[in-house]
Image: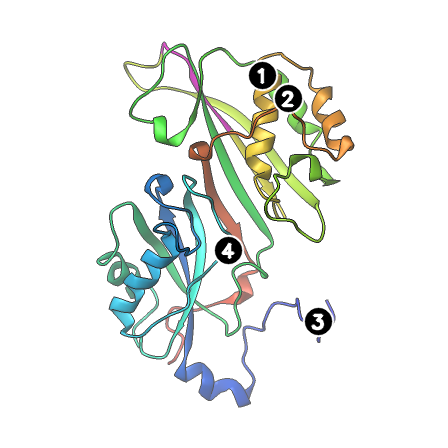
């Protein structure tokens, strides 16, 4: 990128004119995990309790001032995360960034947890500076449901052909216009995205349930996602796993650039944000001087 490109990541070595400001106000990058079952999604809103607001309130209890907490993406109601990234700035916290983990967790409910904290360079933006995101969608293919894990997967009461699903997934790799897998409600300037990897695998259930189906995971990593893109892809792959369509059907759907009426959007409860990736030079040593 050109030196003056506004989308260029901020430098990890501040200029001398900015040094005093860096000492006054530090930027922190949190990695956050949560069970989204009881929340109205990530983003603060008037119609329900959001994870962003709960996290901001907990941080306020620690640093003793109001903070703007920005996340790497707006997960919907019922969606979970183990790798959501959020940032905030504070001039009052003088200890190592890692000490914020336990300090903030003391003020969070047990279904939200800070799992990591790093010093970030000034101007760090969790959305704009992300290079890739990885999501997992979890299915339970079985004749009987699992009441304990039901909030974290989509129960499909029949066998799925994982080989057909894997064959179809390969057709989505690379750079494409994914408009056919975008739900209405959050239009983007471009619906072109690049999928770097789609991994579909199964794992057995624990004792007592291992003979009653399997858990199937669909992990997708891309440079970005459209609204409901992962859930719509999961819904299409399930139709193929049921052998309702051949793997080539997903390629036809992709090229049509139209949302299919014969494939549903997978329920939110099976989706989990696993990881958000960034250039390493956006983060500073934990003993960065204040």
Bin the neighbour count of mark 4 within 10 Å (Cα to Cα): few under 14, some 14-19, many 20 and up.
Answer: many
Q: Which residue is mark 1?
A: 241
Residue 85 in the image: state x and y as whole percent: 45, 55
- Dot placed on the residue nearer the N-terminal end, 2 or 4: 4
What label sits on residue 86 in the rendered view?
Answer: none
Q: Which residue is mark 3?
A: 5
Query: SS class of the residue under badge 4?
Result: loop
Q: Quadrant of residue 286?
A: bottom left
Report the span colored magenta: 211-217
At x 60% / y 48%, what residue is drawn?
186
At x 25% / y 47%, what residue is drawn?
110
- Dot placed on the residue nearer the N-terminal end, 1 or 4: 4
Image height check: is 149 above or below 192?
above
Q: Looking at the image, is mark 2 or mark 1 nearer the viewer? A: 2
Image height check: is 120 above or below 236?
below
- For residue 236, side relative to residue 78 (left or right): right
What label sits on residue 262 in the rendered view?
Answer: 2
Residue 173 in the image: state x and y as whole percent: 69, 35
Query: SS class of the residue under badge 3?
Result: loop
């Amino acid at each position: 990128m050109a030196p003056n490109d506004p989308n260029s990541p901020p430098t990890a070595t501040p200029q001398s004119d900015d040094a005093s400001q860096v000492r006054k106000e530090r930027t922190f990058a949190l990695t956050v995990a949560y069970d989204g079952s009881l929340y109205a999604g990530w983003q603060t809103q008037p119609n329900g309790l959001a994870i962003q607001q709960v996290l901001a309130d907990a941080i306020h209890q620690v640093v003793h001032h109001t903070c703007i907490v920005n996340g790497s993406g707006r997960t919907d109601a019922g969606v979970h995360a183990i790798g959501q990234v959020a940032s905030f700035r504070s001039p009052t916290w003088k200890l190592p960034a890692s000490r914020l983990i336990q300090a903030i967790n003391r003020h969070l409910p047990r279904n939200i947890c800070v799992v990591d904290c790093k010093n970030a360079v000034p101007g760090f933006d969790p959305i704009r500076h992300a290079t890739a995101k990885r999501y997992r969608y979890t299915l339970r293919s079985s004749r009987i449901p699992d009441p304990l894990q039901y909030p974290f997967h989509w129960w499909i009461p029949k066998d799925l052909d994982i080989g057909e699903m894997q064959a179809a997934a390969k057709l989505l790799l690379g750079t494409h216009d994914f408009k056919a897998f975008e739900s209405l409600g959050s239009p983007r300037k471009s619906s072109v995205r690049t999928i770097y990897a789609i991994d579909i695998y199964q794992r057995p259930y624990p004792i007592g349930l291992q003979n009653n189906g399997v858990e199937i995971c669909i992990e997708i990593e891309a440079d970005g996602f459209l609204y409901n893109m992962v859930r719509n892809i999961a819904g299409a792959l399930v139709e193929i796993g049921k052998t309702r369509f051949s793997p080539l059907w997903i390629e036809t759907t992709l090229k049509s650039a139209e949302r299919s009426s014969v494939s549903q959007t997978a329920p939110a409860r099976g989706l989990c944000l696993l990881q958000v990736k960034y250039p390493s030079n956006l983060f500073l040593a934990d003993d960065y001087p204040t």
